[in-house]
Image (cartoon, rainbow, N blue to C red):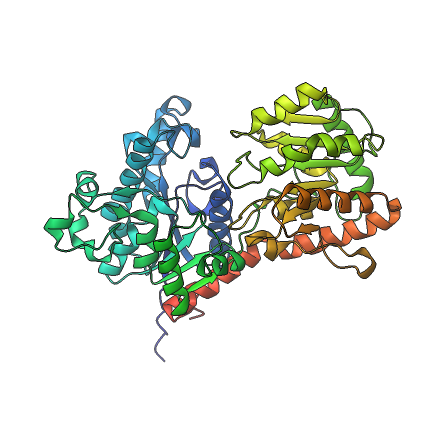
Amino acid sequence: MAKARRIRNPRILIVTPEITYLPPGMGNMANFLTAKAGGLADVSASLVSALFELGADVHVALPHYRRMFHIEVGRFIDHELRLYKNVLPDSRIHLAQDRIFYYRDQVYGSYHAESHQVAMAFQREVINNIIPKVNPDLVHCNDWMTALIPAMARRHGIRSLFTIHNIHTHKMTLAEIENGGIDAAEFWLHLYYSQLPSTYEATRETVPVDFLSSGVFAAHFINTVSPTFLTEIVNGQHDIVAPHLRSEVAAKYASGCASGILNAPDRSFNPVMDPLIPHRYDADTHAPKKKKNKRVLQERLGLKKKDSAPLFFWPSRLDPMQKGCPLLTDILYNVVSSYWKEDLQIVLVANGPYQKHFHDIVRHHNFHERVAVCDFDEQLSHIAYAASDFMLMPSFFEPCGLPQMIGAIYGSLPLVHDTGGLHDTVTHLVPERDTGNGFVFEAYDSLGLRWAIDQAMLFHRKPAEFRARQITRVMNEGAASFSHAVTASHYFDLYEQMLRRPLVNSI
């Protein structure tokens, strides 16, 4: 009897400018590779890891951020460097090589032209070198820095998925793209332009290519990072989404080629084994351990030391356009004053343009023992999740959001505006019915946020055992629902749908 020939698993190439960790089996230096600017890094890492563990033939392409990867030449002896260079090309980690990546200390450029240079160098290396080497069956691209790749993939008959994590975009002419080393003439008809193109020659130097819209236009399938944000774009609910982008997303949606898949937090966000928090805990032991963590945080930030004080945590960047900072500054004095006798405290661990406004309010009203405003720090952020009772996330719009999920996992109940991914992940707490996991307000204004804070304080006044039962339930539900395994399973199914065959063959 002839031996059955093993069918090769379809090969997936995930292209991302950010990643937080990779499975050790994927390459000799996987544990050293870390480059993170936002939530894209978390979901990229979780997806790659989960697919690899499931046995999928998954590869990842990312820029070779030498400085951020902590593998500068001086840190390794020559033998180790030779070994690294010999082994890594045969692994599933494919590093785009260009001098512009080597000495960077942040993923995205601090000015427009620099971001263009980084994006062009990355996509040039993926298009010219990595895709021909990997020979993928499906390319999964993420955000504007990878948005030219689906056009090239379509031209060569490679299936492509384009994920929109945020709606930022950049524009360049075909001439500028070609000067960056990419033969755009080969796939120029699959790109999206700021105005209707005519001939290639007439378009090349005068009509800019919109990167994000090109990714949507050229990809075989697109997804946003929450179901509700997708429908909000299609229905035109956000003025911040350009009309042409909305039209392209709506066209994909109408043809059945768009979906929403929620991101999930990095697996390191787990209070049971989090190495960054002083007192670890699970859903059953959260009450005493969170109080101990609260004491640590209060001591570190100079807040009044009282473990029964209701503590609210702001984890998101202080961006007034998206994250709702003005809603909190408008009511900060009144909230702290109204709950002065109950020792309400607020901790902000975040960078951003609105940080100065919070500092000014704290200084003017001498709120130093009640409100702490700090630059972002990874360890401090973890401690704040583990110490806080509530988490503030009053975003104007939110493609997905991870802090509200992390808050639930750590027993910090989220207060959110009812939008996008927040709508999909937070429901209003009704403790008498054992339902809900936070506090949701619908009107985007400071009165809405104040109402949610008042609701949280009503819950905080309940007996300790009553609160503990609800928080235990929320933590258990959060750990089960907000999992990278759940997210990966959705992408797994989508890949199989696009490829029309299994990702992992049994024969």
Q: Is residue 337 above or below residue 4?
A: above
Q: Quick one: which residue is furthest to the left in this view?
A: 201
Left or right: 266, with 9 as reference point: right
Q: Residue 74, position in %: x, y? A: 38, 21
Q: Residue 4, position in %: x, y? A: 37, 74
Q: Residue 306, position in %: x, y? A: 83, 28
Q: Quadrant of the N terminus?
A: bottom left
Q: Quadrant of residue 481?
A: bottom right
Number of marks present in the image shown: 0
Left or right: 124, with 108 as reference point: left
Left or right: 136, with 173 as reference point: right
Q: Residue 110, position in %: x, y? A: 38, 29
Left or right: 180, with 367 as reference point: left
Q: Quick one: which residue is furthest to the bottom in this view?
A: 1
The answer to whether residue 91 is visible is no
Q: Residue at x 72, y 45 (%)?
A: 451
The answer to whether residue 246 is visible is yes
Closer to the camera, 245 or 158?
Answer: 245
Q: Is residue 228 above or below residue 211?
A: below
Q: Residue at x 42, y 40 (%)?
A: 28
Closer to the camera, 343 or 268?
Answer: 343
Q: Residue at x 43, y 32 (%)?
A: 69
Closer to the camera, 186 or 58?
Answer: 186
Q: Quadrant of the C terminus?
A: bottom left
